[in-house]
Structures are given as structure tokens and as C-alpha cells.
């Protein structure tokens, strides 16, 4: 047992794990916050949403043939 008159100088296992968990949550929050602002800045207008994006180029056709997708 620890003596109540003396301060503990070492960090216990449970205190260490508690601090580690709090640091992970804080780090994840710091990473997630800037991503939400970037997503709003990159919004597309209606014309960009409706344009055709998929182009079946030669390398795409080759990928389909190598992986045996039906034509």
C-alpha cells in the first residue's frame, strides 16, 4: 500500500493508459476538424456535378480484358 503522507513520483499503469487514451482522442479531433472545412471549400456547382467523368480509355479497356470482365 502507498503511504498517504508521501506523494507518488511514478505514474501508475492505469494513469498512463488513461493519459494515452485522452491524447489519442485529442489527436484525432485535431485531425478531423480541418478536414470538414476543406470539404466545404471543394463543393461543386451544378454543371460540374452533371458532367460526364468516366472515360473508357485504352488502359481501362486493358484492365477489363486482363481481369476478364464481360464486354
Image (cartoon, rainbow, N blue to C red):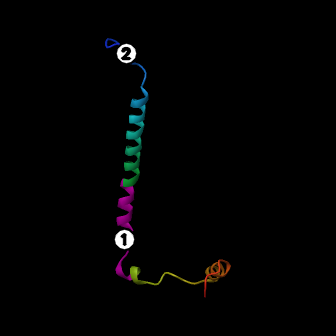
Pick out the residue farthest to the left. Answer: 4
Q: Secondary structure at mark 2?
A: loop
Q: Percent from the top left, x then y, of residue 24?
A: 41, 43
Q: Secondary structure at mark 1?
A: loop
Query: Which residue is painted at 64% across and 79% down in the image?
Result: 59
Pick out the residue farthest to the bottom. Answer: 71
Could you tell me which quadrant the C terminus lies in? bottom right
- Nearest the camera: 29 or 71? 71
Q: Percent from the top left, x then y, of residue 30?
A: 38, 49
Say whether disc 2 or disc 1 marks the residue closer to the N-terminus: 2
Q: Quadrant of residue 45?
A: bottom left
Q: Which mark is residue 43?
A: 1
Taking the magenta stretch, the answer to whether it contains residue 34 is yes
Q: Quadrant of residue 18?
A: top left
- Nearest the camera: 56 or 18? 18
Please give the residue where the numbered disc 2 appears in the rendered image.
Answer: 2
Residue 65 in the figure: left or right of residue 21: right
Q: Residues within 10 Å of mark 1 (few under 14, many from 20)?
A: few
Query: Which residue is painted at 43% across and 29% down in the image?
Result: 13
Part of the protein shown in magenta: 33-47
Q: Percent from the top left, x then y, of residue 6?
A: 35, 13
Taking the magenta stretch, the answer to whether it contains residue 15 is no
Could you tell me which quadrant the N terminus lies in? top left
- Residue 23, compared with residue 49, is above or below; it is above
Query: Which residue is painted at 36% across and 54% down in the image?
Result: 33
Q: CA distance from mark 2 to mark 1?
A: 59 Å
Amino acid at each position: 500500500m502507498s503511504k498517504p503522507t508521501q506523494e507518488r513520483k511514478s505514474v501508475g499503469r492505469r494513469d498512463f493508459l488513461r493519459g494515452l487514451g485522452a491524447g489519442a482522442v485529442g489527436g484525432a479531433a485535431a485531425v478531423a476538424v480541418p478536414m470538414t472545412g476543406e470539404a466545404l471549400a471543394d463543393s461543386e456547382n451544378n454543371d460540374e456535378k452533371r458532367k460526364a467523368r468516366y472515360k473508357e480509355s485504352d488502359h481501362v479497356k486493358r484492365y477489363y480484358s486482363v481481369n476478364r470482365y464481360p464486354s
